[in-house]
Amino acid sequence: MGRLLYPGVNPVYAWFRIVRPPIVFISVLGSLVGTLNVTRPFGLDVDPMTMMLIGLGAALLAAGLMVHNDVTDLPSDKVNRPDKPLCVGAIGANTARITGIGLMVASIFVALVCGIGELDDSTLTPRGLNLPLAALTAIIVWVGIEYNVRGKLAGIWAHVMVAFGVGAIPYWGALAVRPDEPLMMLPLALAIFIMEIGREMMVCIGDLKGDMEAGWSTYPVRAGRDRSLKVSLAFYVGFLPIYPISYFGWLGFPRVFGNLYLIGGAVFFLILLVSWLDVSRVVRNGDEKMIWNAFERDIRTGTRAGVILFQFVLLAEAFAFAVV
């Protein structure tokens, strides 16, 4: 599994790693993408303070969930990733648990003060308390803690719980400034939710050995790798008919995105498909070390890079597309 990264107590580096900076980055960028795509194409701007609060709230929420997750994942990580901070004792489990919950609670308060967007000379500025956003954040926290504590005993529902939080990222950013328009980012959030069920299932296929030794019951543990691969592909394909809704304005949803979005979504799906094909080929080989390396390379790194690429496409879309 590789050399130990924490041969001594290095609190700064250990805390940096345990919050999982790539996940925090994806969450902050995704929330801002949601904010910008429901404002700029419609001729609206957001004041800098609100943008800072949105980024801070997303960062606190993601970091808190990740820190708390490392505590509950400890039995599996000792097998799959023994170099992580909790596994080598660089951070105490109880300290991480309290810190994770504290960060999540702080994110609820930040969401509350993000403020409901009010138009003032084409600029959305905070007015009052954003109760809808605070409520959504509290739900995400509850689902996240439920997953961390009991989720990996729940079969496919474990993957559904994770996917709910991931799909909510752009919706969270949109709700921060346009709570009066809750349908604008809903199709994209639903498409990401469906896709992420499959992606999270793929992650757990790679973690199968450690999850089995930890006594967990994810869908891959229950159904095996071959069946789980087929089911995860079905969820990937489920992304395709949903994400264009916000481009065409189908089913009464507002048209939010332009051509960049449509192309970016197609490229993102191709990345998912190529990664799936590669790990499927390696799984048929049956070599556990090769399987582990393939899932780390294609799913944890490859599809995560695909998510970031899609987010940057959405960021460009916010500045390129104008609703007329």
Image (cartoon, rainbow, N blue to C red):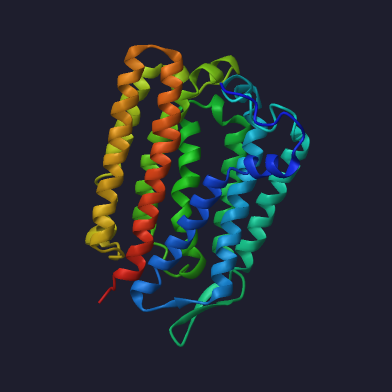
Q: Where is residue 128? Give x, y as percent.
A: 61, 75
156 over 309 or under it: above or below? above
The answer, for residue 285, to whether it is visible in the render is: yes
The answer, for residue 244, to whether it is visible in the render is: no
Q: Is residue 246 left or right of residue 197?
A: left
Q: Is residue 3 left or right of residue 244?
A: right
Residue drawn 51% across the image and 66% down it: 176
Q: Quadrant of the N terminus?
A: top right
Q: Where is residue 43? Give x, y as percent.
A: 36, 79
Farthest-out residue, top: 286
Q: Nearer the viewer, residue 133 or 204?
A: 204
Residue 180 placement: quadrant: bottom left
119 over 308 or under it: above or below? below
231 over 174 or under it: above or below? above
Q: Nearer the viewer, residue 323 or 242?
A: 323
Q: Where is residue 285? Give x, y as percent.
A: 34, 13
Q: Is residue 162 left or right of residue 233?
A: right
Residue drawn 50% across the image and 46% down it: 165
